[in-house]
Image (cartoon, coloured by chain):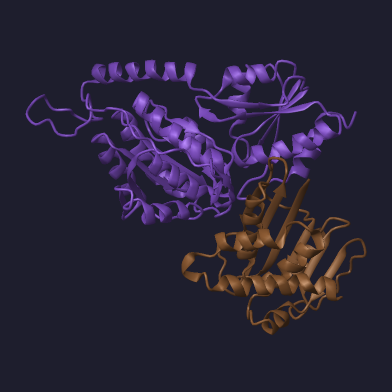
Chain colours: A brown, B purple
Amino acid sequence: MTTEIILAGFGGQGILFAGKVLAYCALIDGKEISWLPSYGPEMRGGTANCSVCISDEPIGSPVVANPDCLIAMNEPSFVKFIGAVKPEGLALADSSMVSAECGRTDIMFVSIPAADLASEVGSDGMENMVLLGRMLAQTGLFSFDTVHKALEKCIPAKRAHLIEANLAAIKCGMSTLVSK
Amino acid sequence: MERSLMKGNEALAEAAIRAGCKCFFGYPITPQTELSAYMAKYMEKSGGVFLQAESEIAAINMVLGAASTGVRAMTSSSSPGISLKSEGISYMAASDLPGVIVNVQRGGPGLGSIQPAQSDYFQATHAMGHGDFHILVYAPYSVQEMADTVMLAFDKADKYRIPAMILADGLLGQMMEPVTLPEPLDTLPDKSAWAACGHDNKRGHHIINSLYLDAPTLEGIVRERFERYAVIEETETEAELYLCEDAELVVTAYGASARVAKSAVTEARKKGIRVGLFRPKTLWPFPKKELCKAVAKTSKILDVEMSMGQMIDDVRLATECRLPVEFFGRTGGVIPTPAEVLGVIEKLSGGVE
């Protein structure tokens, strides 16, 4: 099985990082994986996105045109990619950033106030991890234990103190599925 | 063997260090920059030299100088920067110097775009500078192959005393995939028979030169070099044949476009279309025999590239124009999608069986 994911938002929101966490999860679970960033004259505040493919088979094209799962962290990204999500797919958005209507009845759409939730658990600015947590809970793609190990690989030793806050944000995101 | 997650540019750089590369000279350019950045960070730690030159031209001539002393040397750039290096590459070929040049291709011509492209095929395989010469051209298509190919490129460059190019592209350079890095080499080829590495007054000079004012002398040297090229063409070709055994249509593609094509071929097979993929891993020498084998039962070829169609002539020549060769490509930095390629495959196969 192959899962294709697009993560999109403003530069600086941790889009590429969230994709990298997913990539490391896949590496730890022994899956095939590709991670491809949009690159160009990107900068903080500009748009950024990345394509992540996770599979049991070798991955062909690493460019995702029609994702099984979209994580949109701002309005322009949501508008740009929502139409591309595969039927039966999943779209997640931060409701404090995205006010546009989903307009699709053939996909599952989840909108949570990710930024506020992150602040509530003392993980300011980690809305990317809140959305990632919810996505993992929704899809069952990787366990909390795997994400924990992935974060330890993604976060350099000198920033190790941030692991706990990221984990708290992921846990918070995961819990939004249960509490709904 | 541990798998790690790396960008293609970084995996290539790390593998080069493990291949015994002692000197890296470069000049920054997107989408190659992570390669130089990695070298800047790790080359000195591994006992080598990293130097950001004042220009691409300076960098390639530093490679020429370092290679003359017998050490493994490398430079990397992207399309516009590679054009600047062409003079130096010709001088290296003319001086029988090994060395590795990496081209992480982007859209062209001119400054073009910074997105992935394959529009430097002609330049790499047919005219990487002035004069009668060839260089080895390798085409990796995954992060793993980015790492493996650099080992191979250094070995073959040394074996034949010829520059080797790794023709990658922005997609392969920027993407992360799991890679198992090759073990570091502990012995390197002995080049003391020709390298200008000091003689302690115990032997004559070794002269590294590309100027011959006597025309017949130069002709003799070029002819000798072409005898070596003939051996390379006979023995150093590499290709992957994917589902070609019973293929009525064979797609030809290399590098990033081969990944897209492979996805399309796999999808087409699920629909019952007898299609295969031929992927050259060496572009010079072009794997002619391997291609002829791949198309043995084929009535048509589809060439897919991220260019306006630069490999298509080599495909036609290798098959002596016996088969019609159709073309599908995107250019300027646009990456074709598997769906687009699948559409063309379906059309050429007369629809689904």
Farthest residue toward the right?
Answer: A105
Q: Measuring 57% from the left and 66% from the top, which residue is drawn there?
A: A42
Residue A12 in view: no
Seen in the picture, residue B307 relative to A117 is either above or below; the reply is above
Locate residue A123 relative to residue A72 in the image: left or right.
Answer: left
Across and down, in percent, residue B318 comes to 60, 19
The residue nearer to you, when weighing A37 against B257, is A37
Residue B64 in view: yes
Locate residue B243 relative to residue B162 in the image: left or right.
Answer: right
Q: Measuring 84% from the left and 76% from the top, which residue is drawn there?
A: A179
The residue nearer to you, when weighing A103 against A72, is A72
Q: In which quarter of the image is the C terminus of chain B?
A: top right
Farthest residue toward the front?
Answer: A145
Seen in the picture, residue B277 relative to B332 is either above or below; the reply is above
In terms of image quadrants, where is residue A60?
A: top right
Seen in the picture, residue B352 relative to B22 is either above or below; the reply is above
Number of numbered discs on residues: 0
Q: Measuring 25% from the left and 40% from the top, which residue is drawn there?
A: B65
Farthest residue toward the left?
Answer: B201
Across and down, in percent, residue B342 comes to 78, 38
Locate residue A104 relative to residue B92 in the image: left or right.
Answer: right
The residue nearer to you, when weighing A152 against B92, is A152
Across and down, in percent, residue B85 comes to 38, 43
The residue nearer to you, when weighing B279 against A13, is A13
In terms of image quadrants, where is residue B69?
A: top left
